[in-house]
Amino acid sequence: MREVNFKIERLPKALQEKFRELYANENGNEIVQYLSPNEIYLGDARQLLPQIEPNSIALSIWSPPYFVGKAYEAHLSFDDWQNLLKTVIHLHFRIIKPGGFLVINIADILVFRDPSMPGIQAEAVNRRRSPVTREDVLKAMADHPEYNRYQLAKLLKCSEQTIDRRLNGNNIRGGKYGPQTRVKIVGGLVEEWALSAGFYPYDRRIWVKDPAWENSRWASLSYRSVDEFEYLYFFWKPGITRFDRTRLSADEWRNWGSRGVWYIPSVRVNDDHEAKFPVEIPSRVIRLLTDPEEIVLDCFMGSGTTAVAAIRENRQYIGIEILEKYVNLARQRVAAEHHPAES
Ligand SMILES: C[S@@+](CC[C@H](N)C(=O)[O-])C[C@H]1O[C@@H](n2cnc3c(N)ncnc32)[C@H](O)[C@@H]1O
């Protein structure tokens, strides 16, 4: 196990306890064979993270399932999803170097089903085909209290669906009788899980990507914006952190190193993995927060983007991915980095 290079006694009491527990367990139950760097492992992050050498990871950067119904997360309930992320974050505390970072790329859940949310009483003015208003229907009901909706429709020369919609409001997201959907803001959850693991929120940045118009068929019937940005949350493990302004050039500091908003186009061709992030995301974070040869971890490795960035930046990497097809893809991408001519 690597040495701890700072004074535990200087930390808040609760954190001192956490550190002591951590090292006590490790000595009592030492894992002899740790995962080697520069490999991509097939398996569940929750099973494999405990096999990484303690205090060895300078930076862990990953983008987890977002709970938006992708094939690789479709089996998860919202509780499962929260447990997955919370467990993975907690497992990081042992393996990140003191003074090192955990960076999470995640987005709010824009279409989150919430059965407790009242139906939105939306009136789509531009799209309304029938000129009949809610007031017309209410007046007809007052004039003819004995009429059912079919008779009201006949009277007002419209369909009974129009009567229904004028009375109940249009449910414009999630189907007429489906539960309402709302935005689920995930930053607070991630912050809570990281704090309870022993990390401190250090920074947050916005990644502005391409606007996803094609996923927003409701955009013309609501005041919601299209999906076009995600977050990068930086968490710090207490310890000694090296600050080296020469890691980036003056231009790079000005253009992105010191900037809170990063404009980076999305990966346009997602034909081999449905949710890749651009290499530029891990590359920037790696260059900002680590030195050459340090180990970078991605435990939701997907197509291997973080490994590619690590190789290009002359860092070591460890990758973990649960689906074999993506492990194979990631290994191919790694091989292509080492032997570009053969790929
Ligand atoms: C958002 S994608 C990451 C994409 C990656 N950043 C890239 O550029 O290709 C999340 C990945 O996590 C994987 N995954 C889901 N649950 C996992 C788990 N419990 N352990 C390890 N990997 C998991 C999925 O198969 C998926 O490839």
Image: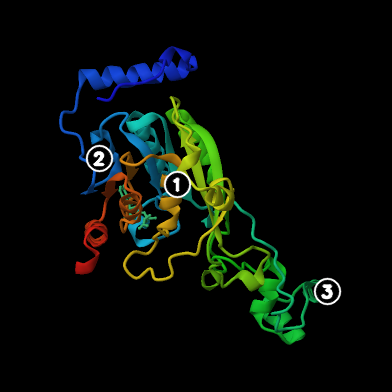
Query: Residue at position x 64%, y 63% from top?
Result: 224
User: Which amino acid type corresponds to the residue marked 2 in the rendered image?
Assistant: Leu
Mark on residue 32? none
Q: Is residue 289 above or below residue 73?
A: above
Mark 2: secondary structure = helix
Which image quarter: residue 295?
top left
Query: Residue at position x 44%, y 25% from top?
Result: 240
* Disc nearer the start of the sequence (1/2): 2
Q: Nearer the viewer, residue 40 or 132?
A: 40
Percent position of residue 311, x then y: 30, 51
Q: Nearer the viewer, residue 229 or 99?
A: 99
Q: Are marks 1 and 3 in contact (CB under 8 Å)?
A: no
Percent position of residue 15, x then y: 44, 20
Query: Residue at position x 77%, y 75% from top?
Result: 137
Q: What crowding class fits label 1: few (fewer than 14 Cα within 10 Å), some (14-19), or many (20 or more)?
A: some
* Disc nearer the start of the sequence (1/3): 3
* Disc nearer the start of the sequence (2/3): 2
Mark on residue 285? 1
Mark 3: secondary structure = helix
Percent position of residue 83, x then y: 39, 40
Say if residue 26 shows up in the picture.
yes
User: Which amino acid type corresponds to the residue marked 3 in the rendered image?
Assistant: Lys
Q: Is residue 42 above or below residue 192?
A: below
Tell which residue pokes out farthest to the left in this image. Answer: 32
Residue linked to disc 3: 139
Q: With 279 as the anchor, is 143 left or right in this view?
A: right
Disc 2 Cβ-to-ligand 1 distance below 8 Å: yes
Mark on residue 48? 2
Q: Nearer the viewer, residue 210 or 296?
A: 296
Instruction: Calculate the distance from the C-alpha at mark 2 to the C-alpha at mark 3.
Output: 66 Å
